[in-house]
Every structure is written in structure tokens, then in C-alpha cells.
Amino acid sequence: MNDKDPVDAIVEQWAAVRPDLDTAAMEVFGRIFRLSRAMGDRMEKAYVPYGISRGEFDVLATLRRAGEPYTLSPRELSATLMLTTGGMTGRLDKLERAGLLRRSPDPHDRRGLQVTLTEKGLALIDEAVGSGLATQTAALSGLDSEQAGQLADLLRKLLTSTER
């Protein structure tokens, strides 16, 4: 494969000024970072028609994946999404104002709250997830299914080794 990308140019520049450096890791992570940024932008655009951001999508999707009754505590949401409780509160406020979720007292903990998808939120997330997947599928169109599977396997292996 002779397709050059911006990371190749960066690696070549380093090779010219610091030939002693092993830039193999830069070749991998430089592409991961650039891909993450590019796909993040595409995903934001995919959710615009639904009136939500990627972060708000993540909240709604987490509730949807929890299964019926689509309810979690704010703490469970924060832990799943790796957000502070303050960051979560802002998202929940906006989504509640939009009628996509509701907060209510936790019947098992009088100090706690539960967050539940509304019917409107359930309908919206079911549409938005399809739009997001279509965006991701289109981005993978340069790979055949075997290559996409290999990439997923390699990224899984890399992710598990770095999260240990």
C-alpha cells in the first residue's frame, strides 16, 4: 500500500532530524488520535438532526442499553461515562428540559435519584443510534469485512493492554 497520510509526513520529518528515534508507536497512536478527532466530528454532525450532542447521545444510549425500565442512578451514569457528577448534572438538566429523560426519587434510597428515559427519549435514541452507526459504517467502507474485523481485534487487544 502506497497511500501516504499526514502521520507518514510527521514520521519522515522525525527520521530526518532524529534518526535515532523509533517512531513505530507514533505511527499507531498518531493515527488513532487523528481518527478519533475526525470521527468525533462526524458523530457530532450525525446527532445534530436530533438536537443532541455526542455527550448527550452517550447518556441516552447508556440508559437505553440498560434495558427496561431504562433507569440508572446519576452515579451509575457518571461511572459508565467517566464523567464527574458536575459534568453529568449539566447533561441531565438539558436532556430533562428537552423531555428525553426524567429524574425521580430512588424508592430504595431516600437520598438518591434515578434517571429514566421517557418515551420521547427512547424513540429519539433508537433513531439516533441508527444514524450514528450509518456514519461509522460509511467510514469503514474503505475496508472489507475481514479487514474491519482484524482492526477491531487488534484495537481490542491494544485497549485491554493499555487499560490494565
Image (cartoon, rainbow, N blue to C red):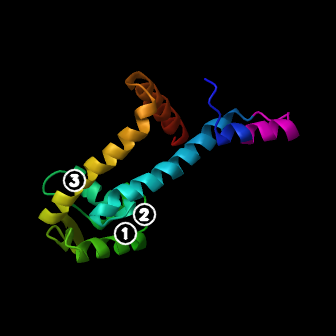
Q: How far apart are marks 1 and 2 (CA)?
A: 6 Å
Report the residue at 74% width, 38% height from top: 11
Q: What residue type is labelled 2?
A: Leu
Q: Which amino acid does label 1 sit on?
A: Met
Instruction: Please provide percent x and percent y for residue 157.
Output: 49, 31
Q: Which amino acid does label 3 sit on?
A: Glu
User: Can residue 76 be seen from the camera position used here?
Assistant: no
Q: Distance between the residues labelled 3 and 2?
A: 25 Å
Q: Which of marks 3 and 2 is in front?
A: 3
Which residues, given as a range, are shown in magenta?
10-22
Instruction: Please provide percent x and percent y for residue 53.
Output: 37, 64
* Residue 83 marker: 2
- Rendering quarter of residue 139: top left
Q: How crowded is mark 3: few (under 14 residues within 10 Å), some or many (20 or more)?
A: few
Q: Residues within 10 Å of mark 1 (few under 14, many from 20)?
A: many
Instruction: Please provide percent x and percent y for residue 57.
Output: 32, 59
- Element assignment for label 3: helix
Among numbered discs 1 and 2, the one appearing first in the sequence: 2
Q: Identify whether 115 is placed above or below 38.
A: below
Q: Mark 1 points at which residue?
A: 88
- Element assignment for label 2: loop
Of 88 and 119, which appears nearest the observer?
119
Among numbered discs 3 and 2, the one appearing first in the sequence: 2
- Element assignment for label 1: helix
Is residue 143 left or right of 65 when viewed as pictured? right
Residues under numbered marks 3 and 2 in contact, where contact means CB atoms less than 8 Å apart: no
Of 53 and 3, which appears nearest the observer?
3
Q: Identify whether 56 is placed above or below 89.
A: above
Quadrant (top left, top right, bottom left, bottom right) of the N terminus: top right
